[in-house]
Image (cartoon, helix red, strand yellow):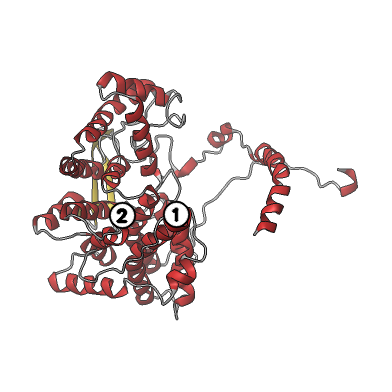
């Protein structure tokens, strides 16, 4: 390893210099995108996603169309298999049940389970919630990483080697692999973190075993905490977070990645690893970490008054505060405008958790930013649609109050989203479409080849 590091150091200056050459020779004139009518990021001029497929798994609505054909923004709506997300959550909350397992069943099979089906599915997840013998020692502990998403991706790819039938893409086999991964993801995330904390933060190495009678949310908290303790409110709110993160249409980056890779006919493990790579990005699953860090800076530097918070948001937009990116993290969404239904739901439960933990003052900051930021952004930026708090805005706060390490924020997102990815993979395989192959117009000027001695 030391020899390799010396090689890296030796070539560092050359890499830096040639990176400038890369930028120079890959920089496309922005005007060409308009000339060639390119939908950058698969979005039209109004920011709407370009339709590339059909799905029955979930639906997102942010506007209606009036009698004159004009777009009218409305409160955001999210449906899982046609069921409004609020109704789904209200249903299991009213019966004092945990909902993630029911949600995973709904996404995979397209219908709600009856009591017997749900109990059987719950038991199946519990039976699959284990890793191969010595996997933690031989795979997770041998190369501890500073990023848990990389740990999960590496572990998923390695699980291919433990599967006796990894390349079979029949629906029955993919379903078995999917349920196995849904069950295993909490272990991969938590064990990866425990090993990281031991080797990089000098903490004790604690590896708890899951309990089969507990829900996914309860097991996450039990595995994560040294004393295995959690309150019912904590577990139920984390469960709601998992439900809300489980799926969000076929157009989000990681799910689209899943469908693109699935369309090639490759195996489940490669497909899921690709989706994990997408979700890791700070523009996607890593956004709630930015929200939490932004609020740490806000609370350290700014009183909780409307005028002070307004000034802080102005400074954010002017690239004079926090990370100087010009972004207000947690505000705005590619689809939603007036409201993100997931954020609306999480706001209710974040308030309950804040009251239970005596953190009302922290919650007050979030309430004020959620109200003031859209106003300031509307004043300072040319907007094609409204903006509002998104799901990352409140999930970051909830994870902070649950004392979940920031290293686990995005992994917990993946623990939920593997259910949606699995449903989309099965839908893509069932409908057997063509391999997804978007077109790119070539705009490089022609040039003649020069012999080496004339360059």
Mark 2 crowdedness (10 Å alpha carbons): few <14, some 14-19, many ≥20: many
Q: Which mark is residue 202?
A: 1
> Residue at 47% of width from left, 57% of height from top?
199
Percent position of residue 38, x then y: 52, 40
The mark lying in front, picked from 1 and 2, is 1
Q: Determine whether the residue tagged by mark 1 lies in a helix, strand or loop.
A: loop
In the depicted view, which residue is nearer to us: 104 or 353?
A: 353
> Residue at 35% of width from left, 39% of height from top?
292
Image height check: is 172 above or below 195?
A: below
Q: Which residue is mark 2?
A: 247
The quarter of the picture where the C terminus appears is top right
Q: Determine whether the residue tagged by mark 2 lies in a helix, strand or loop.
A: loop
Residue 99's image quarter?
Answer: bottom left
Mark 1 crowdedness (10 Å alpha carbons): few <14, some 14-19, many ≥20: few
Percent position of residue 127, x then y: 28, 75
Left or right: where 19 falls relative to 37: right
- Which mark sits nearer the N-terminus, 1 or 2? 1
Tell me if residue 66 can be seen.
no
């Amino acid at each position: 390893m030391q020899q390799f590091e010396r090689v890296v150091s030796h070539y560092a200056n050359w890499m830096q210099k040639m990176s400038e050459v890369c930028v120079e020779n890959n920089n496309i004139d922005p005007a060409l995108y308009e000339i060639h009518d390119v939908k950058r990021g698969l979005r039209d001029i109004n920011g709407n996603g370009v339709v590339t497929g059909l799905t029955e798994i979930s639906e997102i609505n942010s506007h209606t169309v009036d009698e004159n054909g004009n777009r009218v923004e409305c409160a955001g709506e999210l449906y899982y298999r046609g069921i409004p997300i609020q109704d789904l959550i209200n249903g299991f909350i009213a019966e004092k049940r945990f909902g993630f397992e029911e949600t995973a069943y709904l996404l995979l099979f397209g219908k709600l389970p009856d009591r017997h089906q749900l109990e059987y599915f719950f038991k199946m997840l519990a039976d699959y919630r284990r890793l191969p013998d010595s996997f933690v020692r031989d795979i997770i502990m041998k190369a501890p990483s500073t990023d848990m998403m990389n740990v999960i991706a590496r572990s998923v790819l390695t699980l291919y080697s433990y599967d006796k039938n990894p390349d079979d893409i029949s629906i029955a086999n993919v379903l078995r692999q999917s349920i196995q991964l849904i069950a295993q993801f909490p272990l991969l995330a938590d064990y990866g973190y425990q090993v990281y904390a031991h080797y990089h933060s000098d903490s004790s190495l604690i590896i708890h075993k899951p309990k089969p009678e507990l829900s996914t949310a309860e097991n996450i908290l039990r595995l994560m905490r040294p004393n295995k303790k959690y309150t019912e409110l904590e577990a139920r709110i984390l469960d709601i977070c998992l439900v809300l993160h489980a799926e969000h249409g076929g157009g989000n980056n990681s799910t689209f990645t899943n469908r693109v890779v699935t369309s090639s006919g490759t195996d489940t493990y490669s497909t899921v690893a690709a989706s994990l790579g997408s979700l890791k990005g700070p523009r996607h699953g890593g956004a709630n970490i930015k929200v939490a860090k932004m609020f740490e800076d806000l609370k350290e530097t700014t009183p909780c008054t409307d005028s002070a918070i307004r000034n802080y948001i102005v400074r954010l937009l002017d690239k004079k505060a926090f990370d100087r990116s010009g972004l207000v993290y947690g505000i705005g969404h590619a689809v939603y405008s007036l409201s993100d239904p997931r954020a609306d739901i999480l706001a209710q439960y974040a308030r309950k958790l804040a009251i239970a933990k005596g953190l009302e003052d922290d919650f007050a900051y979030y309430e004020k930013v959620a109200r003031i930021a859209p106003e300031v952004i509307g004043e300072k930026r040319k907007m094609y649609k409204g903006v509002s708090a998104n799901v990352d805005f409140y999930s970051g706060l909830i994870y902070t109050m649950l004392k979940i390490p920031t290293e686990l924020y995005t992994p917990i997102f993946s623990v939920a989203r593997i259910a949606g990815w699995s449903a989309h993979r099965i839908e893509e395989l069932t409908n057997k479409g063509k391999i997804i192959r978007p077109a790119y117009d070539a705009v490089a000027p022609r040039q003649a080849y020069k012999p080496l001695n004339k360059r």
